[in-house]
Image (spheres, rainbow, N blue to C red):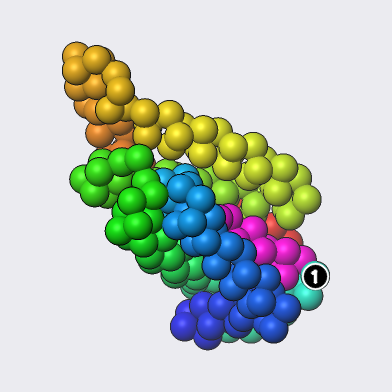
Amino acid sequence: MKGLVKYDLMQLAGTSKKSFYLLYFVGLAAVGVMLGGGTICSYMAVMIGCMTGVSFFSYESWYHWDSYCAAMPLSNRQIVVSRYISLLIVTGCGVLWGIVIGVLALAAGKMDLTWTQWLLSMVQTVLAALLYMEIEIPVMYRFGVERGRIVNILLFIILFAGISALAEINEMPAAVTSVVQLVFGVVWVVILLCFPVSIAVSMRIRAKKEY
């Protein structure tokens, strides 16, 4: 399983891809710190890190990786779980870069939230990224790269809009804020509990495919 994770990460570490991601995330940091967009840029770093998971499936399609795996002594569980681990690692990198952007923006006075408000919003963004992952991987296994990419872009837009709306929760009346926080607190717990379910669904979908 460790070898499968390394393979995924090495695909992202290609020279051209590495340069692209480096420029992109440095650009996010520059915008966040210099132009006052630290709040939204720190959230974007997390979600974009999560979205790179689509690339893993693209590489599989280009190189017929599934057919190669079928000839190796690898179980369906190892292949699926390694994909989740790879995506968690990449998302974790996005989280770390989002924290760097947020801390720099806060230190420079270029953010419209307090430290506590921003940290709470980052936690919500990480949970939203986990939800995206829980849906993204089964969708990619079920529909493939082309159709799955469309679904995931729509999902990203919906989740990002939700995160932006949550950032405005502090401007709501106190009674409304309490209810919203309670509802989303329950939703976040459900998201965490559904992670093993997502893995099981992905394993079942992949097991039915022929390579």
* Quadrant assignment, res 53: bottom right
Secondary element at tag 1? helix
Instruction: Give the x, y percent position of residue 44.
Output: 51, 51
Tell me the residue that label 1 is attached to: 62
Taking 77 as reference, is 148 above or below it? Answer: above
Residue occupying the point 55% across, 33% down = 158
**The one of 11 and 211 positioned closer to us in this rendering:** 11
Residue occupying the point 22% across, 26% down = 182
Q: Which amino acid does label 1 sit on?
A: Trp
**The one of 21 and 196 positioned closer to us in this rendering:** 21
Residue 26 belongs to the span the image colors magenta: no
**The one of 56 and 116 positioned closer to us in this rendering:** 116
Q: Give the range drawn in magenta.
A: 47-61
Residue occupying the point 31% across, 41% down = 113
Asked whether residue 19 appears in the rendered view, the answer is yes
Instruction: Give the x, y percent position of residue 168.
Output: 36, 28
Image label count: 1
**The one of 39 and 61 positioned closer to us in this rendering:** 39
Instruction: Give the x, y percent position of residue 200.
Output: 46, 53
Residue occupying the point 64% across, 54% down = 141
Q: Residues within 10 Å of mark 1 (few under 14, many from 20)?
A: few
